[in-house]
């Protein structure tokens, strides 16, 4: 099946905001976040309203996996349902160690401490209602590549682009890392330096879609434009008679400095639902 069901509607108020075509869901019982809540010791029948039913949640998570990794499945999973269950099992196993709270986004420290990818339920406002939304968090393992499998690593790394510099993979330096873009510098992957990290863009410097920028000392400069650190927005459309379009926050982007952080912009410094943290 491609996309979302051809018919959807607002379900019973106590359970889901969005329920997919009942013709599909009556043929099969789709694994939902009920499994996660039960595994965490909650009664799914009396818990807060969820964004969607099991089929909706599975498709939402699968879209997030594709957006973040460039592939449909991770860690050897072969179906949406198996992948959803795997991610929820990882979350259940991580809850106590990382002190996770249902409804609350993970902190940068909690994300950094992840040893496995998880799906966590966070509270967001959708269409004027507060609902629990499944959000994908990927563990930042040292050997993990970005969506393209691209890795640039060394003791000292220096990159210069005459126009745009777009990183969707991993840029890593054991010591210092510098990157200069004549126009825009956009990161949706990992840029990491063990010591000093310097990023400079002639126009905009953008960290988005779960991107991570981290080092001991971090300097970010957008000469003529904005420095933007933004939480990505996942959009989903239902091709129903009334057309439904939903948008809600996904994984937070993070800019972290163990010591000092310096940010300079020709226009604005914008942080939208993401993490800016220095020692």
Image (cartoon, rainbow, N blue to C red):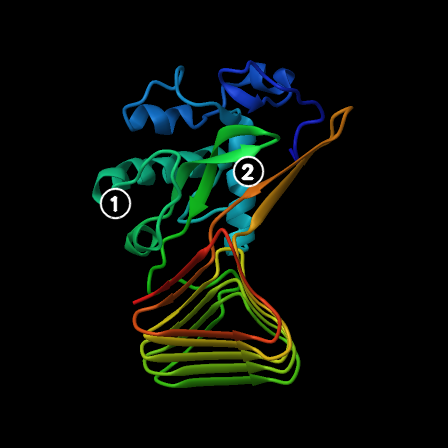
Coordinates of residue 275 in the picture (x, y in percent): 42, 57
| Residue 205 in view | yes
> Reading the chain from its start, which is encountered first: label 2 or label 1?
2
Which residue lies at the image location 45% right of the left edge and 25% below the top edge?
A: 31
Q: Work out whether 124 lies above or below 253.
A: above
Which quarter of the figure is the N terminus placed in?
top right
267 vs 72, nearest the viewer: 267
Which quarter of the figure is the C terminus placed in?
bottom left
Quadrant for residue 70, please give it: bottom right
Q: Report whether 77 appears left or right of 60.
A: left
Q: Name the residue tied to disc 1.
A: 98
Kindly state the secondary structure of the residue where label 1 is placed.
helix
Which residue lies at the image location 33% right of the left edge and 39% below the top edge?
A: 91
148 vs 9, nearest the viewer: 9
Q: Report whether 240 appears left or right of 62.
A: right
In this view, which residue lies farthest toward the right?
241
Which residue lies at the image location 44% right of the left edge and 49% below the top edge?
A: 74
Nearer the observer: mark 2 or 1; the answer is 1
Q: Residues within 10 Å of mark 2 (few under 14, many from 20)?
A: many
Q: Which mark is residue 261?
A: none
Kindly state the secondary structure of the residue where label 2 is placed.
helix
Coordinates of residue 263 in the picture (x, y in percent): 47, 73
Q: Residues within 10 Å of mark 1 (few under 14, many from 20)?
A: some
| Residue 72 in view | no
Coordinates of residue 224 in the picture (x, y in percent): 64, 77
Q: Name the residue tied to disc 2.
A: 60
Which residue lies at the image location 37% right of the left edge and 83% below the top edge?
A: 176
Quadrant for residue 173, please give it: bottom left
Distance CA(mark 2)–CA(mark 1): 24 Å
In this view, which residue lies farthest toward the front?
267
């Amino acid at each position: 099946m491609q996309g979302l069901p051809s018919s959807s509607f607002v379900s019973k108020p106590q359970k889901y905001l969005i329920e997919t075509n009942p013709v599909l869901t009556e043929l099969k019982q789709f694994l939902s976040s009920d499994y996660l809540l039960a595994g965490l010791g909650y009664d799914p029948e009396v818990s807060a309203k969820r964004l969607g039913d099991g089929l909706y949640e599975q498709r939402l998570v699968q879209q997030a996996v594709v957006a973040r990794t460039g592939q449909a499945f991770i860690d050897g999973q072969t179906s949406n349902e198996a992948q959803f269950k795997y991610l929820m099992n990882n979350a259940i196993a991580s809850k106590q160690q990382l002190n996770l709270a249902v409804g609350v986004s993970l902190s940068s420290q909690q994300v950094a401490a992840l040893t496995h990818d998880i799906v966590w339920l966070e509270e967001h406002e959708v269409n004027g209602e507060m609902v629990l939304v499944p959000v994908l968090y990927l563990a930042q393992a040292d050997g993990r590549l970005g969506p393209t499998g691209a890795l640039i690593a060394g003791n000292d790394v220096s990159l210069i682009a005459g126009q745009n510099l777009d990183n969707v993979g991993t840029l890593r330096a054991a010591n210092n890392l510098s990157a200069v873009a004549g126009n825009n510098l956009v990161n949706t992957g990992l840029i990491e330096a063990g010591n000093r990290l310097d990023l400079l863009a002639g126009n905009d410097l953008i960290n988005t879609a779960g991107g991570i920028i981290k080092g001991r000392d971090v300097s970010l400069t957008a000469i003529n434009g904005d420095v933007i650190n933004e939480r990505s927005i996942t959009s989903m459309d239902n091709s129903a008679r009334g057309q439904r379009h939903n948008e809600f926050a996904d994984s937070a982007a993070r800019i972290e400095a163990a010591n000092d952080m310096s940010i300079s912009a020709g226009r604005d410094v914008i942080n939208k639902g993401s993490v800016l943290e220095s020692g």
